[in-house]
Image (tube, rainbow, N blue to C red):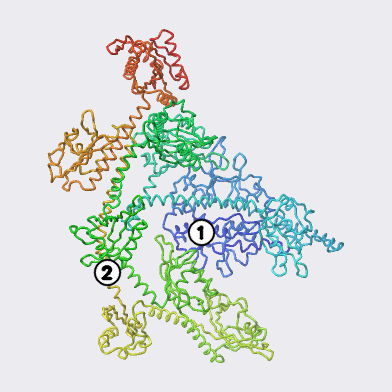
Amino acid sequence: MPASSLSRFDSCLDAAINPNPLKVSPQTPLCEVIALMSQVRQSCSLPTPRRISTDNLIQDGRASCVLVMEDSRLVGIVTQRDIVRCIATGIVDDPVSVSSIMTTPPITLKRSQFHNLFTAINFLRQHRIRHLPIVSDRQQVEGLVTLESLRSCLRPLDLLQLRRVEEVMSPEVIYASPNVTVKQVAQQLAEYKISCIVIVEKIANNQLQPLGMITEGDMVQFQALGLDDHIRVDQIMDQPLKLLHPDDNLWEAHQQMQQQQVHHLVVGTETGVISGIVTQTSILHALDPMEMYTVIQMLQQQVRQLQSQRVEHLTRQPRQQVTVNLMPEQDLNAAIVETISSLVVVLDRQGRIVRFNQACEVLTGYSFAEVRDQVFWEIFLSPQQQQQVKTCFQNLETSGFPSQQELFWQTKGLQARIISHYNRTLFDAAGQVEYVILTGEDITHCRQTENALKTAEENYRHLTEELEHQVHQRTEKLTQEIAEYRCQEIELKWEKERLKFLLCLSPAIIYSCHYKSYKTTFISENIQTILGYQSEDFLSNHNFWWNHIHPDDKILIAVERDQILEKGYSCSEYRFRHQDGDYRWMRDEAKLIRDEAGNPIELIGYWIEISERKQIETTLTEREAILSNLCENTTLMMGVIELVDDDIYHLWDNPATRKLFSCNEQQMKNQSCRRLGMAENLIQLWLKHCYKVHKTQHPAHCEYTHKTPIREHWFSATFCPVPGNFTHPRCCYVVEDITERKHTEEALRHTTQSLLESQQIAHIANWNFDVISGQITWSEEMFHIFGLEISLGEPSFEELLEMIHPEDQDHHQQVLDRSLTMGEYFDIEYRLIRPNGELRYLNTQGEVRKDEQGQVIRLFGVAIDVTEQKLAEEALCASEARYRALVEQMPAAVYTITVGEASMPLYISPRIEQMLGYTADEWMSNPQLWSQRLHPEDREQMSNRLSNLPTHDHPFGDEYRLLTRNQDVLWIQDSAVVIRDEDGTPILLQGGMLDITERKQAEVALRQSEERFSTLIRNLSVGVMLHGSQGEILLCNPKASQLLGLSEGELLGKTSLSSEWEIIREDGSPFPYQDHPVPQAIITRQAVKDVLMGIYRPSAKTVEERELLWILVSAEPQLIEDRKVQHVICTFSDITILKQVQENLRTSEQLYRTIAHNFPNGTIFLFDRDLRYLVADGQGLAHLQLRREALEGHRLSEVLSAEIYTSTEPLYQTALAGKERVEEVQYQDQTYLVRAVPIRNEEDEVILGMIVSQNITEQKQAELALQRANLHLAEVNQQLEQSVKELEQRHRESAIINEMIEFLQACHTLEEAYGPISEFLKLLFPSCAGTVLLSNQNANQVESIATFGELATGELNLAFDECWALRRGQIHLAQGSQPGLFCHHVDCHPLPTASICIPTLVQGQAFGLFYVRTQAVEGLSKGQQQLAQTVAEQISLGLSNLQLREELRNQSIRDALTGLFNRRYLKECLVREFQRSQRSGQPLGVIMVDIDHFKQFNDNFGHEAGDVVLQKVAQFLQRQVRLSDIACRYGGEEMTIILPEISLESVTAKAEELCQGIRQLQLSYQGKDLGQITASFGVACFPQQGCTPEEVIKKADEALYQAKDRGRNQVVCA
């Protein structure tokens, strides 16, 4: 069989070898090896049938084994199985190296023996290994072959489809329980020497149900994460499992491994019974080479028969009638093997279809007969792609046909399908294109899936960004108050604290549990913050959760949990006992997690505390009742109207509206405004606003006057849209009578305006300018800023202008004129000159006030002294200017750019214009200018350099070429450093570009000098060879033979050296023969001079023993008359040593000169023992007015004056004497730091001296400025610390007040609020004592309800006359310096240092008093006084709201006459108690009571007497029932009592007791005896008499009527 039969597999040899396996040294710690092997593997989509992704192979190879290398030799190999063995024995935690566990020596295969993939398969099978290193003949590692790489390369579809899983699977499967630990699994893997274990659990009939799988790779990943090896295995196993059926073919198993990226698959039946396991080794064993060879031979025989038949057919018919040409043998083999299940179209050179297989017919809907001889693109492609394919066919002869394409085919049903083409061109015997074969796959579904995934990823990214944005906003809000007063370290600390605080206060408790037993497997740690328990309480106690649920809620939860298997989720609300014993309402949402087979696994869910929401719901119910009562009893006019044509109809109105129109409810309902007598202009006004509301769906407001026969009213109306689909627009309105408010608004306007102005300019100097009178008014602070005495009064406007700096007066006048004429905001910063001549900077802002005609009448505002800020800004600008001047004077162009994909220049010094001809502005405006001016040959190098920045922070450099504006080439030496953020991420690149063109030219001159030198010795000690016109060697001298190591006979006749010779360029890249000087001289007919080549001669045995020979080669062609090359003379010399010396000298000289020349702000002098300057360089020479050329080569005495020579010569002698000396020298008002340093040779003898001088003037000045700045900053910092303390104190007090307000809002009664008020007042006033007193109008006194600190008894309850604040109606502050001003109620034993009394008013009535006293020496500060006022206002507001809520609550649920609960409250309570009884299983009793012959009382004694009877009976019932019982007035003389948790017998007995008690009542009215009172009782109980509240009430009512029918005054049980 020819070797070409397996060419398909042989072409995959390189793809099967991972050229870059993971390598470590023998000393590498084992922990580091595990970390490297556990790196996250890259994933990719399933490869297409004819393309192999080597990325996956490389990544899997890295993850499954490590090669151990020592001195480039392979000494061992470590696999995942070795790591598992270490985990099992416990040595993985010991500090051992990889050499102690590696397999040595490793089994390898030479690359020359790796003929095809089956060689590797047989080798792996023979040695029972899974990793095979590939080495060269010299035992150098070239790559790694693994089972995964072989399986991915071998894709014989037909052979795998013919083999069933059952034939190759391993029936011996090792199982483990999900309860075993990771370490136990590792021990099993090591004991049985297997690569995976299946995790199972027993189900019915002792069958095993697979849950997951643990592989060796999982164990390595687990160990790399540093987890505890006692963790249960079900927490880390791969799940869920997708089972293979024994009847599935191996191709399906291969595809599942590719898709899931696994190496093992479990085989099982439909019932889940495990049959065996399939690994990638099993699949490779199925590919028996002999069997594959047999199949291929059979296919070849069939191909030959088909070819013979085609040839015979062609000999009988003309060529033009043949539609399908025979393909060559190899192409036909590939077509048969590779295109069976693909789309195949054969086109001739004109694009006509000559072959169309069945797969194409199924996809497109066209038959072969319909498309035969038709142009392919005219049928299937869109106009845009038609031109593309047509162009490819037109260029077949020149550029060929693309090997791969993606085209949109249009089917017969006009559907678009995406087809991935793999094209092949066939040629005839003359080399002309004959046919083009298009082999394609329908990838429409794949593209749709990819687009869906991209959309999902984009949505997730947007959601993540939104969440991050919300978290960022919340964090910024929390840190806003103190961000201005914290330095960066404190701010970072607070940020971390806040983040930790947010995580701890997460409102949701996340958990997971078993879906049957509800045993908790996980619960988040914030459970302690929310419910007070530790997470271990739930994990360790199986019934902990159930035991803490409220007993009344357990039945509901049990029902909900029973249904979770059907619904897949549950959502319930129940009460859970907190650690403090109280119950909290929790919302519990859980979801059932299932595996791929649909079997339940566990429940995951979350808790959220909803106690506050439950309370809000209760509050909303109460508020609904309040609002209903408010609508009926409010003075506001409310209603709903409908707009019909040009009129308004009232659908519903409250009593206030009906009162305005003097109508009852029936008269108002559905009545138009015109019929009600509403003025026409008001109707039109209402219509205008109502239609506007209907159009905009936003409320509208207006005010208008309405005349009634009595008076004229001012009304304020608000209209709102009524949502819904109605025939005509509807609106609701609220109208308030604001007549009184209008009268008082004018009086309050001036007072309010003054208050607002005072608040705006608090603690800031304020001023006021009356435009009409020209009078200026200043605050006290304003006088201090201007340096004027307050006693002298405010200056005039002209005097004020004279104090302003002359340069700022015009600007000040212009801004003032704009404010006075145009009403603009007055904002200006200017300089003023105080009377003492001091210059100050002032920032003044102000607003204007206009009269009714729009004329400015007043200008007022604030002024702030910003002198210190301005001085700091000027100092900063001066420092920046010095730095910029220094940078601009440097000979290099200094730059700063950002790092990233979109690199942006931030700064470039003006030196760039001198270098490249582009200004700094052009450079900054064009971010791409640098890359555009790069020399084309250097662009790739610099692009790679910027993409791979160094990880260190040290300067790094490069040399490259830039093109100037004139297209001149400029050599640049670029030295830069990477600037990183706190996380170590590169953000900036700062450096300098130095023009080194002259240096490069000098290097060229040096090479030319070397060329001349080489020419001189050409005939002496250089190799000379004479080449023919074809490059063959005709003659060579002995030196050439000596250098090349070959005899003259071996060289003669050669055109090039053999492949064993390795020739390189100077940069190390290969030197191809066509670039050799001899071929180049032959081609160009010109001499090729001095070509540098490096040669590795093949005489060495190993790579390490090879010697690199550097030769300098020249070639000169000898031309004849017609300019043809006759001979080429080639000369070359050994310059290896010269090359090394030149490189060392160049590096040393360049480094030395660069350091000296760029020595910042200083100079370096190098001199010999004769005090002759050898080197004088540095940036400081210009400051000393010296030139390098004038110094170098001259003695010290020749260039310096006698005076300077005398003072400096001892310093030079010190260096030559072998001593170091440092001193500061003053020269021309500059300070220099001068250092004398001796230079010694290897024998420690002083041969040279060096003087280093550096200008430190600016450093000295900066130190002085820094000292002054530090003093100033210390003062400012002290002020800021004081301000921060005050702000923190106010922030803490505000937080306490807000918390107190929240408590007051959460209280239900006044008494409930007294305790929290006392506790919060202790926190707010820790060094004070005091009390909150509420007014008792009946006793004409205020009484204490909450105290803090120690107070005398007389200070708790006091009469109105004992307090000055209550008498005067305003705040009263008394100090110890004026003891006569203390109130009478203040205890004088001892006398406080200060006290404050703050009266509180609610709706003009005295509500109470807030009294605070202190014994502190400093008394009550301004802040404490302001705090006391705020606390008094908030407490009075909160208590008055509580009082109002209690009144409204009682009014909404109580009957006004009897004081019993009303019928509405009865319905609510009955439903609530009924539900509680259903949950607890306790009975619920109901008693219906009706007073007998009640109508007679009304008829005989009057309705007032009847009311007395109802009140007395109600009071009797309230005294007789339990606290848990609920007595209500059902209606008229009927009353109802609800009795929870009481049996029917007890309810009946209680009714008899009440019946007897009512008979014994003695009632009278206005001195008249009302006689005996009796009542009838009906009794019913749940569940005996009904299953719903309505049924029980109905039964009790029926029993009541039976009692009346039987003669009244008795009890009847239903």
- Quarter containing the C terminus: top left
Q: Residue extending furthest front?
A: 709
Residue 548 drawn at (x, y percent)? 39, 33
Mark 2 closeness class: few <14, some 14–19, many ≥20 residues within 10 Å: few
Residue 706 drawn at (x, y percent)? 40, 35
- Real-space CA distance between mark 2 and mark 1, rounded to the nearest whole angstrom: 64 Å
Kindly identify the amino acid type of the residue bearing the numbered disc 2: Ala
Note whether 912 is above or below 244 in the view shown: below
Considering depth in this image, is 600 or 1266 the residue closer to the camera? Answer: 1266
Note whether 836 is above or below 769 in the view shown: below
Q: Nearer the viewer, mark 2 or mark 1?
A: 2
Which of the 4 quarters of the picture holds residue 1022? Answer: bottom right
Considering depth in this image, is 296 or 1464 the residue closer to the camera? Answer: 1464
Q: Which element is circle 1 on?
A: strand
Residue 103 drawn at (x, y percent)? 51, 59
According to the picture, the residue beneath numbered tag 2 turns out to be 1265
Determine if residue 798 is in view: yes
Kindly identify the amino acid type of the residue bearing the numbered disc 1: Val
According to the picture, the residue beneath numbered tag 1 turns out to be 78
